Image: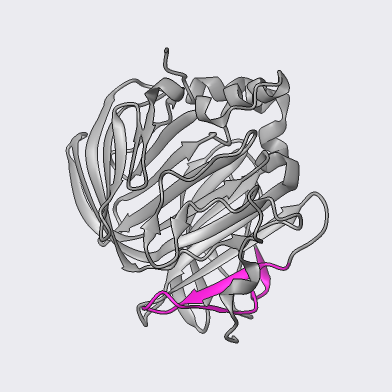
Amino acid sequence: MHASSVQQDAPPASDTVNIRACAPGVGPCFDAAVMPEGYLWWYVDALSDDGQHGITLIAQLGSCFSPYYAKARRRGNSDPLEHNSLNVALYGVHKRWCMTERGRSALRRDATRLEIGPSSLTWDGNCLTIQIEEITVPLPSRLRGTVRVYPQTLAGQPYQLDQGGRHYWAPIAPRAHVEVAFERPALRWSGSGYLDSNWGIEPLEKAFQRWEWSRAMLKDGGAAILYDVTQREGQRPPLGLRFNSNGEAEYFDAPPHVTLPKTGWLMRRGTRADLHQGASVAETLEDTPFYTRSVLKTHLLGEPVTAMHESVCLDRFSAPWVQRLLPFRIPRARG
């Protein structure tokens, strides 16, 4: 591992890509611009201390995986703010999933607050509070609750993901304490979590074939994150970052690739782990035709870790048969 200035991967000084979805050391900025054909999201995940529950939440402007947005772009309508959603996935006994898309009329935002329909995200400088009021699919039920994310480390420096400088990622809180309290279903737990943001000025599938991402907590109070993308043009080495308990980042050389078992949808999965240590899937949380989320038991930076992991295949996402399936998982609200 070697220390390095994180500035080298910051966005260049260009108005077209200098979209600040967060401020380093400060937190999320919900009034950031979203470019035509582009996207912007804030992502949270957490696992309960007892290992029985988990959650992911993604507040999306210009929803990347929306079939309606993809169709609108093909017709020449590239307004991202007509396609917004709060994706919530609960894991464990009370498994639930929702992702209702809403248009401009349901979107309200300023620097510290984002409202998408009846749900909202609010940042007060110390805590991100997410109020959830949604309807699940495929079986309709009410999803109502509050998630609070307390960063234990605040970072926020952006990193370039692609060769052309059109896609960026910023780990806002590499490590956080998360409190989950739902009325429907009745559910309450706390655990460790994570907060980041991604943005870009073109569709993801235009730049990438696939990616593998994972984050793991380290015993010294820090976190390790791996981002491994396969581009359509050019190559960038896998990004390995170690964050200390103060949110300061060091690059480390990504360890060897490890192939993981395919999912029920035959999605490829892989990660990187210390030499001669390997990795295994402890639990598959989500299995879809183009996207999978898993909990891994792996080894990074000389220690055993539990990692949240995702695999995304944009070639699968773009396939006509997948596009036809998506409206059943992503309804669009009227109005």
At horizontal 40% and vertical 35% (from top left) the residue drawn is 86
Q: Is residue 292 left or right of residue 146?
A: right
Q: Quadrant of residue 221?
A: bottom left
x, y percent for residue 37: 65, 34
Q: Which residues are magenta?
A: 237-258
- Tally of numbered tags: 0
Location of residue 146 with respect to 4 vertically, above or below = above
Find the residue positioned furthest to the top.
334
Whether residue 166 appears in this view of the structure is yes
Q: The C terminus appears in which quarter of the rendering?
A: top left
Is residue 250 located in the magenta-colored stretch of the structure?
Answer: yes
x, y percent for residue 304: 46, 77
Find the residue positioned furthest to the right.
233
Model colouring: one colour
At horizontal 39% and vertical 68% (from top left) the residue drawn is 25
Q: Give whichever of 205, 257 is nearer the camera.
A: 205
Whether residue 277 appears in this view of the structure is no
Q: Is residue 115 left or right of residue 291?
A: left
Is residue 280 located in the magenta-colored stretch of the structure?
Answer: no
Location of residue 22 with respect to 154 vertically, above or below = above
x, y percent for residue 155: 43, 68
Q: The N terminus appears in which quarter of the rendering?
A: bottom right
At horizontal 66% and vertical 35% (from top left) the residue drawn is 317
Location of residue 80 with respect to 19 vertically, above or below = above
Q: Quadrant of residue 273?
A: bottom right
Q: Give whichever of 223, 39 is nearer the camera.
A: 39
x, y percent for residue 315: 73, 39
Q: Quadrant of residue 263?
A: top right
